[in-house]
């Protein structure tokens, strides 16, 4: 396992994933903004949140690249299709479990069963993040499949 390779391709695949997600927002495919969601977990400054969240997302992407590399080595399969399959499972996990978990501990996000509060809060993602638009699960799955395929080819 080459750590330099994992860092290079983990960084690259995370940049691709984040870029496609960011481009899908103005195209009307989703309202989800991962850097903003992550950034507002650690800062209340909404202007600074996207930059902080982008750095957090890169770090998370590197950690996932390491997990993918371990999985590729354990299965002894290093192909784009296996990476895409792992990416699909990863995307399903993010949508079904990850987005629900983030809503439970995000300090600036409304909780799904909480009524309105006087403090402005972020909308919780809902099941499969559908509160952020009908295209959100589709875009999220596609970018995670691409993330995994890139790692499958280059790791």
Image (cartoon, rainbow, N blue to C red):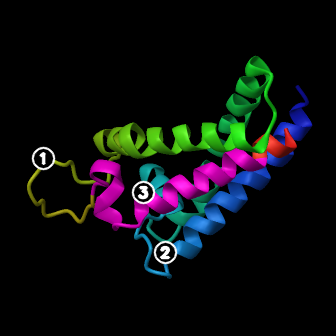
- Residue position for label 3: 137
Q: Secondary structure at mark 3?
A: helix
Say whether residue 147 is magenta: yes
Main SS of residues in magenta:
helix
Residue at (12, 46) in percent of width and height: 113
Instruction: Give the residue at the far bottom of this rendering.
Output: 27
In the depicted structure, whether residue 55 falls above or below residue 61? below
Label 3, label 2: how many angstroms apart (C-alpha)? 13 Å
Q: Secondary structure at mark 2?
A: loop
Label 2, label 1: how many angstroms apart (C-alpha)? 26 Å
Measuring from the top left, give residue 116's x and y in whole percent. 10, 60
Q: Are marks 3 and 1 in contact (CB under 8 Å)?
A: no
Res 74 visible: yes
Q: Are marks 3 and 2 in contact (CB under 8 Å)?
A: no
Q: Upstream in the sequence, badge 3 or badge 1?
A: 1
| Tag shown at residue 113 | 1
Measuring from the top left, give residue 10's x and y in whole percent. 76, 45
- Residue position for label 2: 25
Of labels 2 and 1, the one closer to you? 2
Q: Quadrant of residue 83?
A: top right
Residue at (32, 47) in percent of width and height: 107
Q: Secondary structure at mark 1?
A: loop
Of labels 3 and 2, the one closer to you? 3
Q: Which residues are magenta?
A: 124-150
Please state which of residues 84 and 108 is positioned toward the viewer in this rendering: 84
Question: Which quadrant is home to the N terminus?
Answer: top right
Horizontal side of residue 132 vs 143, given as left or right: left
Instruction: Give the residue at the far front of this rendering.
Output: 81
């Amino acid at each position: 396992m080459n750590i330099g390779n994992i860092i290079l391709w983990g960084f690259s695949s995370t940049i691709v994933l984040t870029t496609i997600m960011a481009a899908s927002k103005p195209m009307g495919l989703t309202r989800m903004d991962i850097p903003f969601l992550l950034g507002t977990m650690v800062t209340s400054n909404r202007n600074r949140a996207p930059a902080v969240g982008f750095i957090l997302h890169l770090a998370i992407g590197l950690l996932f690249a390491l997990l993918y590399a371990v999985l590729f080595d354990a299965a002894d399969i290093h192909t784009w299709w296996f990476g895409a399959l792992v990416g699909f499972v990863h995307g399903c996990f993010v949508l079904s479990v990850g987005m629900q978990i983030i809503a439970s501990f995000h300090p600036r996000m409304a909780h799904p069963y909480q009524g309105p509060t006087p403090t402005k809060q972020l909308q919780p993602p809902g099941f499969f993040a559908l509160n952020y638009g009908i295209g959100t699960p589709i875009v999220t799955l596609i970018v995670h499949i691409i993330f995994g395929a890139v790692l499958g080819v280059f790791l």
